[in-house]
Amino acid sequence: MQAPLNAIPKTSATEQGTIAGDLLTKGSEALASGLYKESLALLLEAFSVAPNNTDIQAALFDVLSCTTGYTLPRHVTDAMADAAISDKQRQNTQALAMVLSNQSKNHAALNSFIELLETTEPTEIMDDALQTEGESHLAGVLDDRLFLLVATKAIAISPQIERFLTQLRRHFLFEWSADVTASTYFLDNFTNLLTVISGQCFNTEYIYDVQEAEVSAIAALKASVLANIRDAHVIDLAIIASYEPLWSTLGSCDPEDLNYLMTEAEKWPAWAQLIWKTQFLAPCQEAFLKQSLHTLSPVTDPFSNAIGAQYESYPYPRWQTTKLPAKALSLRQHLESRFPQSALPAVTDTPAKILFAGCGTGEQVVQMGLGLNAQNILAMDLSTNSLAYASRKAQEHGMDNVHFGQGDILAVKDWDASFDLIVCTGVLHHMRDPAAGLASLMKVSKDSSIFFLALYSERARAAVIASRALVTEHRIADDIAGLRQFRALIRSLPDDHPAKSVAACREFYSASGLHDFIFNVHELRFTPLQVKDLLDAQGLRVIGLDVPRGEYIALYKEQFPDDPAMINLENWDAFETDYSDVFDGMIQLWCCKD
């Protein structure tokens, strides 16, 4: 459908603010009720009235990220892309990946160019097709701000975008390798695309397929560049960066050569500096931060070491932007606003001490750390590479009250410390004994402490279970070649295969995401009744659940009117039996001591 945009008559600024606020309220209410098409129409109208209103942007991005089947006018997608990169950015650029996915399905110029790329030899397209028919097709792509933004700052969840970039990367590699005198033509026409290709390939961690001929060609280009690194052309580096991160390519270079490159990079054009900053300077910073991490406790458990080793190789998620709160609340204010029907313990109204037990790459640390008044935050994980990434992102967001350290949840029980809020989401289900992990965390809680936990849902992960079975059946290796093999297998399956739906997930489009999703060393899954047993054993009670989809909240209230706080896990077990996707794969709940 073409998403509606109603014309707004010219009014005063005050009247426009009133109109926009009213539309925002109605659109947010529709979103909370699961009326996505109605919400989308209202919020698009609000956005047309007040495109710089960050509350409207946040609500619009929320509905766009969970809605399909629409096409937006170009001026609207351009405006959303501009909002996502504004100085006051609070939105998650990844939310726009779903918009791009919808747009690309019906993008005539893009799909025509994909066909052209797939039917033309690499060494012919630049000289002939691209300069005639190709340029007319590309005109609608190169100035598409949404496409450029998502490709460089997020992970595109689109088979069309993947085909486009995979084919274009191959053509650029062979054309450049065949005629390095083409640098002027490249610089005049393709710098945006070079940034897009290298950026998206880096974001996906090079999950896209690579042909054997490309492997040979890129190896030859790398050898040539490394033999004369000071003479390397920026296009050399951009093309290499489309196949592997510059950090790994240049890591073996002589330090003096690297210093020379770093000086030269300051003179490069903006498109090349973006590649350099993302693929070289940021990893350098992480390597430095990794050296300064504290060891909170030695990781001696063999099972914990196996999980930690996995995330050393595949830190997840490699997020770039995230949705940020408008203001910080006390922990009590946050819980009272989220769960007004629940009886709360004596939760602190002063700045809280927060523990993130298994913080990964720190997205939740940044989101919640900026959304809650925190005295200090301790973020721990098994993986030092994940912690270094998290530390870099926390610094980017100006957080000076966060301390990162390596440690095992199993050792927390021996700490002489206590916390007001203990966050452990997406972690316990990767432990050999989740109950032991939760028991250890209980040792650093107060009587008034709050726990925020998240555990995989047994019923919601049917496609994951089927996928993991395929990995075993086909003996798919746990490496990048195996990840690519798995993706090809999934795409070859009939639409009614129980594993097919994983191809529509964000995790399918990045190496670390797919590894975490399907190839994880170990995962357990829970029903709401099993979660209840886990909590009961530690004397915890539920004060609220995060239910991602609004339509299910309304249905639950209708079916269980005697549970206005929606905290009865026996009810949720019965509800999930009928609506297996209610928790979107993860049962997320807030708890306190009973």
Image (cartoon, rainbow, N blue to C red):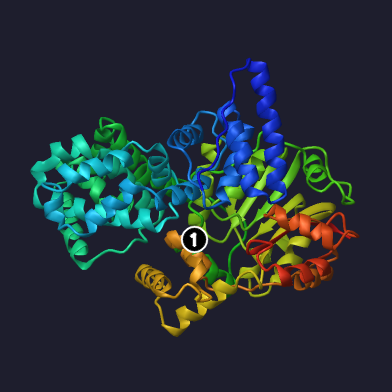
Quarter of the view holding residue 493: bottom left
In which image quadrant can residue 303 be found?
Answer: bottom right
Front residue of this view, candidates 259 and 420: 420
Q: As shown in the figure, which amino acid type bears the numbered disc 1? A: Glu
Q: Is residue 435 visible?
A: no
Residue 475 coordinates in the image, percent (x, y) = 41, 82
Q: Is residue 530 left or right of residue 301?
A: right
Query: Most extreme residue toward the top, as rendered?
Result: 12
Front residue of 495 and 212: 495
The residue depicted at 82 percent of the width and 71 percent of the height is 537
Of residues 409 and 589, the one nearer the viewer is 589
In-image side of 78 versus 196 (left or right): right
Residue at 49% in and 30% down: 86
Residue under circle 1? 507
Please name whichever residue, 40 or 245, is drawn nearer the observer in this view of the structure.
40
- Examine the rendered structure and indicate whether residue 127 appears above or below residue 386: above
Horizontal and vertical percent for residue 244? 30, 55
* Element carrying mark 1: helix
Which part of the image, by quadrant, shows the C terminus?
A: bottom right
Q: Would you place residue 497 above or below residue 121 in this image?
A: below
Q: Position of residue 290 (x, y in %)?
A: 48, 51
